[in-house]
Image (cartoon, rainbow, N blue to C red):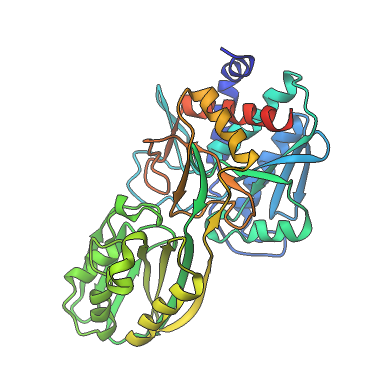
Amino acid sequence: MTEIRKYLENHKDEMIELLSELVAIRSVQGAESEEFPFGEKPAEALNCMLRRCAGYGFSVENVENYVGTADYGSEPLLGILTHLDVVPEGTGWSGDPYALRRTETRLFGRGTIDDKGPSVASVFALRAVRELKTPLRRGVRLIFGTNEENGSADLAYYRNKRQLPPLVFTPDGEYPLINGEKGMLRVYFSAELDEDICINAGKVINAVPEECVVSYRKKGELVVYNGKSAHASTPEKGDNAITAFLADYSGDSRLLKSFQQYFQHGDTSGSAIFGENSQDFTCVLSLLKTVENSLTGGIDIRFPMNRTKAEVSGIICDVLKKIGFTIDKCEGSEPHYTDENSDFVKSLLRVYERVTGDKGYCITIGGGTYVHEIEGGVAFGAQFPDEDGNMHGADEYITIENLLKNAEIMAEAIIEICG
């Protein structure tokens, strides 16, 4: 056992205690104010983490409740980017989502794998390097965001105010290493309601909706369609409650009947929209609500490296306009790629192989990680191959062993790159 691993084993309970404190804060995006750009709770989680980091001897900064940083050493060469905001809890939990539940091997709670657990791991990785007095030639900066789940406006603001370190990775994805990310598009739309119906489905645009509540006012009938939540980048792991409703729909709304044609239950690629080349797409109708006399909704699309945002947005917006919707907002990002032969990527993969004993390799995913807009940035962890921590779903968890292993890998990466 290495000195770093021994240190982490000795501080395991302290790591879990910090994670418990963070999980207890329901850091879902809230009402915006001048002091709290994403609501009070994300800022509360950020300040909780910064207080801890200051107590551990790091130099901390809170950049106006958008982003916080903790530095060790001067002239940071490496940035480890995590986030402390979470998606809403949803339903189906075995216990309180905001009270960390510990079993013999697992830690359950919202944010344990995405991304509060990895945030804690990054802190204790840097603590291990510092307290074991491992010599570094360049500094390290831990970067804690508060808006990753709702567009990463936090990071855009931070980058306008401060400069990122030259090398950045985020444990906001999967091992061994993500160097390619599909393009992403989020489309919000609305139209005048053409039926006396009330629909409420979906909480966030980047998750498969697990419930769709439909009320037919004239009939006095209420129907609840149940599905299974999943991240919008992996919709095949979920069951879309909105498309379940559409498959069952037999009313008079032309809008909803058109949706039946384009959003078929069980189809997660948008084949009726993107045609024969849709196999590398994901397309999720994730929001559908009636607001007064309007029907509003949202669609999350992930598209392959050989397509552009302009091309994909043109296709989906044309379809929605054809149905009769107005496009309220259409935003997204181009695909992201970092050269797998860069020294940075090679260094991280060497660390992964050394700590795990497994082969390191690069992968491309449909999800957009926190480094999607950062040139040269990669996702390094936190989920291991063949692991599913129920990210964005009920009973989200991280294993105790993998919390420690993430911290060990990050500590070794700091030494490899900055030592």
Compared to residue 21, the image places residue 155 above or below, namely below
Q: Nearer the viewer, residue 344 or 72?
A: 344
Q: On the rendered structure, is 220 left or right of 169?
A: left
x and y percentages locating residue 375 in the rendered image? 64, 54
Residue ID at (64%, 28%): 411
Q: Nearer the viewer, residue 253 or 330?
A: 330
Q: Nearer the viewer, residue 137 or 291?
A: 137
Q: How many marks?
A: 0
Residue 120 visible here: no
x and y percentages locating residue 31 in the rendered image? 59, 63
Q: Quadrant of the N terminus?
A: top right
x and y percentages locating residue 153 in the rendered image? 63, 61
Residue ID at (62%, 43%): 342
Compared to residue 3, the image places residue 261 above or below, namely below
Q: Quadrant of the C terminus?
A: top right
Residue ID at (41%, 65%): 301
Q: Residue furthest top?
A: 1
